[in-house]
């Protein structure tokens, strides 16, 4: 093994961590039989030295495996998750790591089985978009390292979490509509047992203040079809909303579907960008964020185990494309 | 272990295969140290008896892992793949199996690393949407079982493949446009080194016959932005096309984006349905198929190892929503 000047090698990592080269190799190749404490020490040195494995091809020839991270999320077919998955793959690739995914489809027991299955196979560095169920069982897995994305894991204190600035997202979406003269602004949201949903609603409530009308707040709708029915119901009220804040992409899509059949042209702002948002006419105004930052934040926390209970907040911004700038009738 | 009448148990499987209960348990729990031949024998008995493990929770309590299939595909953020992934998860769940995914992002060497990484971790039952690169290296993995989806793996003879009826898809899309009076019909397609793309183009060429104009055939465009530029170029020709056949969902989306800025209203038919296809006005006419059948076909072939070189063809149909029914100007 020859050292390129300025490029730390596994030998440098071994020296820095005060362990054998074999131990570093075991950690780098995710082989078993390394204690959690030793693994953490090696990883801290890897991170301190900025060691980057760049010998994927030669290791492949030797039959070694790539460093593999696990990503566990709710529903792979939802665009939020598929964008996140792609971004996590790209961030992991910068560390020459691969990613395996699993999605649990709103069934918390499948979330747990995915964790157990990956862990049993040596994939013990996990990025998890947690379900709203209790996660205290995760603590009983020595060596398992997890970073949570988008929301807090209920029942697990001291977790590392990378989330969006959801309160601010709800706030700026609602303020944007208020600034166009809307006063009756409905909220369409899903399970507010999720910290992200709860925080977006908090931003919405804060912006509205005394103008808040609880009869315009819809909670617990998950699929676009049910959102459409709720939008139609609200538009049929004696005093209907003139604008909507859709707290996720499925809610925005449900609004689009409902409006295809309706004469009304309410304003609406979505949370989460989606591929076709600017192909519609008018384009869909959304609260947007850099999904690469979300992914990179999670991968960085996962590979740098120098802390615990860390919270990273990714900023959000409003992108005006037309649907959020429609004035009240 | 008590047998429910009509419900085969692991004991029945052991008796049928003529092996020990321990061997059946090892195969079912994907533990190592079972020869490929023995594993195939047990799997054949599992499949012959219709054995279904329904003890996920108890195995979880014992610390055992779920049967885990691997799904390797090109790009998780593309809707074709995320729909496929969700459908494979659902089909696997019927066998109480979990799925881990990996996507290789148009980099065949990452496809190989994903296979190696999963294989090294005991995930040796793989569903692969193969890249256009040579796959002969796959043969050197004892015990690895793979089923290919959507296209043939170059360089690997005797592979099991579940694909769409792509020739027919290209044919009915083009005939649909011909029946509306179009004669100048452009094809927008990507890498025709992929058997699926090649076959869709064959259907298109067959339908057009002598009316085929090679100057209206676009190959090798992958992203919607480049599709948009090609659509604009074609519409600017002295004798422009009056209709388009988009050979995949990205091509259809690129056409939608181009037409947002253009005065022309050509007809177009896409291949692959997508979530928002019926929310646009006009709705997007597509060649559609049942992605659940595609996924279930692959999972069934993977779990039933009673053959080799099997080919399953999933039927396609045309769904008229408006964009494919626009007459020539």
Image (cartoon, coloured by chain):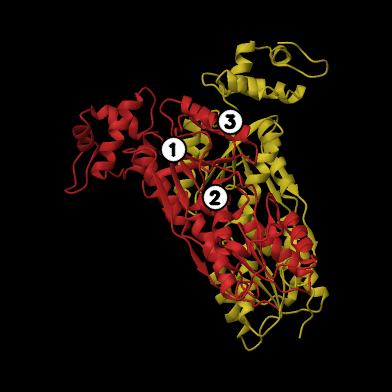
Chain colours: A yellow, B red
Is A135 positioned to the left or the right of A189 in the image?
A: left
On the image, which quarter does residue B260 sit in? bottom right
Residues flagged by tags 1 and 3 on a common chain: yes
Q: CA distance from mark 1 to mark 2?
A: 16 Å
Which part of the image, by quadrant, shows the N terminus of chain B? top left
Chain letter belonging to callout 3? B
Tell me which label, 1 or 2, sits earlier in the chain: 1
Is A126 positioned to the left or the right of A242 in the image?
A: left
Coordinates of residue A43 in the picture (x, y in percent): 67, 24
- The secondary element bearing badge 2 is classed as helix
Chain letter belonging to callout 2? B
**Residue A25, above or below A111:** above
Measuring 73% from the left and 23% from the top, which residue is drawn there? A51
The one of B292 and B203 positioned closer to us in this rendering: B203
Tell me which label, 2 or 3, sits earlier in the chain: 3
Q: CA distance from mark 2 to mark 3?
A: 24 Å
On the image, which quarter does residue B40 sit in? top left
Residues flagged by tags 1 and 2 on a common chain: yes
Residue bearing mark 1: B159
Q: CA distance from mark 1 to mark 3?
A: 20 Å
Coordinates of residue A65 in the picture (x, y in percent): 57, 25
Residue bearing mark 3: B113
Give the crowd class for mark 2: few <14, some 14-19, many >=20 residues within 10 Å. many
Which part of the image, by quadrant, shows the C terminus of chain B? bottom right
């Amino acid at each position: 093994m020859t050292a390129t000047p300025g490029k730390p090698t596994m030998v440098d990592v071994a020296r820095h961590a005060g362990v054998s080269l074999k131990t570093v190799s075991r950690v780098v190749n995710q082989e078993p039989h390394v204690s959690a404490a030793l693994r953490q020490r090696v990883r801290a040195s890897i991170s301190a030295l900025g060691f980057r494995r760049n010998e994927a091809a030669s290791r492949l020839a030797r039959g070694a495996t790539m460093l593999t991270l696990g990503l566990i999320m709710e529903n792979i077919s939802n665009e939020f998750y598929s964008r996140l998955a792609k971004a996590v793959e790209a961030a992991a690739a910068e560390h020459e790591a691969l990613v395996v995914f699993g999605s649990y489809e709103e069934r918390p027991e499948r979330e747990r089985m995915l964790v157990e299955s990956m862990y049993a196979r040596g994939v013990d560095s996990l990025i998890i978009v947690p379900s709203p169920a209790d996660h205290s069982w995760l603590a009983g897995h020595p060596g398992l390292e997890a970073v949570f994305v988008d929301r807090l894991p209920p029942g697990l204190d001291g977790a590392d979490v990378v989330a969006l600035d959801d309160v601010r997202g709800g706030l700026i979406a609602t303020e944007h509509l208020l600034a166009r003269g809307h006063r009756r602004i409905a909220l369409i949201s899903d399970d507010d047992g999720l910290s992200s949903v709860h925080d977006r609603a908090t931003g919405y409530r804060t912006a509205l203040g005394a103008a808040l009308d609880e009869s315009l707040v819809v909670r617990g709708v998950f699929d676009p079809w049910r959102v459409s029915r709720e939008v139609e119901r609200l538009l049929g009220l004696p005093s209907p909303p003139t604008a909507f804040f859709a707290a996720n992409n499925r809610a925005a899509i449900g609004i689009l579907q409902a409006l295809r059949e309706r004469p009304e042209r309410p304003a609406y702002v979505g949370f989460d960008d989606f591929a076709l948002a600017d192909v519609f006419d008018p384009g869909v105004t959304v609260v947007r964020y850099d999904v690469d930052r979300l992914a990179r934040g999670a991968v960085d926390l996962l590979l740098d185990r120098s802390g615990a209970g860390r919270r990273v907040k990714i900023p959000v911004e409003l992108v005006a494309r037309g649907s959020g700038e429609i004035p009240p009738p």
